[in-house]
């Protein structure tokens, strides 16, 4: 697994992020205006394996990850991609902005409301799950989509039909918990930590073994 900070010497420091903030707009601009130690890569960037995004990076081009991208491994990361972002799977806990399309072959999971999830283009994935996360995006090709707040029962059912049961907590809940949560749609979302654990262990997220 690639820890992106080990590639720090390949990137430029970006002490003045004002031009990028003006270009992106939205909530990500607030994160850009604060000193998070932003780095910059000019042109397209290809990451050859699963990646731990543990720094703040602006990619002035497309970003392609041959594997999954997780911004909460060894430290909360932030990512601005001014072109397209292409991944197998994406775990977005920190701040994310994509100026083009976000294309994932598998799962996109956005979690935690202190940061932002913004895609100026469309999100394409087998499943998009947003959980207590500010999000501004347009849905593209999606087999299932769970909204950040008040997801519809059919959204939850569609995701459950193709994701493995191990990403849910049902199997560990006792009868009292089941009764208490029966009317709470949010109780039936896939859990972020379970998704992370399976990705890092190389275990499938989908019932068809993908």
Image: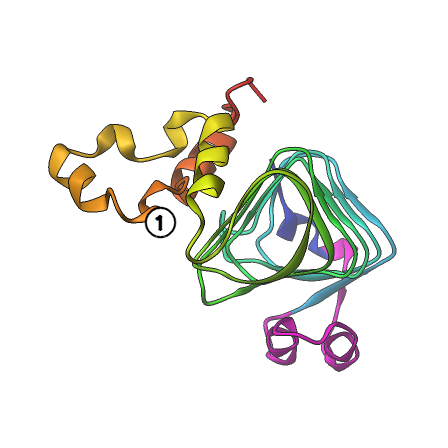
Left or right position of 101 against 52: right
Q: Give, as a single range, the part of the protein colored magenta.
A: 9-37
Magenta stretch encompasses residue 103: no
Q: Residue 210 location, x and y as percent? A: 59, 22
Magenta stretch encompasses residue 19: yes
- Residue 96 sits in quarter: bottom right
Q: Residue 153 location, x and y as percent? A: 41, 43
Residue 201, can we see it?
no
Q: Residue furthest top?
A: 208
Left or right position of 171 against 146: left
Look at 82% across and 51% down and name the residue there.
62
Q: Quadrant of the N terminus?
A: top right
Q: Residue 140 location, x and y as percent? A: 71, 46
Q: Residue 99 location, x and y as percent? A: 77, 61
Of 169 and 74, the residue lying toward us: 169
Image vertical order of residue 89 relative to residue 130, above or below: above
Name the colour scheme. rainbow
Left or right position of 114 against 65: left
């Amino acid at each position: 697994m690639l820890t992106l900070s080990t590639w720090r010497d390949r990137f430029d420091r970006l002490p003045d992020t004002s031009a990028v903030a003006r270009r992106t707009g939205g909530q990500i601009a607030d994160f850009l205006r604060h000193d998070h130690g932003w780095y910059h890569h000019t042109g397209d960037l290809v990451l050859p394996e699963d990646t731990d995004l543990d720094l703040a990076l602006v990619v002035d081009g497309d970003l392609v990850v041959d594997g999954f991208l997780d911004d909460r491994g060894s430290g909360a990361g932030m990512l601005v991609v001014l072109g397209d972002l292409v991944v197998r799977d994406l775990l977005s806990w920190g701040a994310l902005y994509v100026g083009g399309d976000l294309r994932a072959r598998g799962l996109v999971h956005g979690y935690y409301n202190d940061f932002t999830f913004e895609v100026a283009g469309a999100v394409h994935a087998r499943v998009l799950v947003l959980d207590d996360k500010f999000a501004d995006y347009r849905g593209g090709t999606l087999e299932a989509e769970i909204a950040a707040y008040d997801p519809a029962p059919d959204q939850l059912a569609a995701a459950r039909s193709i994701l493995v049961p191990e990403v849910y907590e049902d199997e560990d809940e006792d009868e009292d918990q089941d009764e208490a949560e029966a009317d709470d749609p949010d109780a039936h979302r896939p859990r972020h930590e379970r998704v992370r654990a399976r990705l890092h262990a190389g275990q499938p997220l989908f019932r068809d073994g993908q």
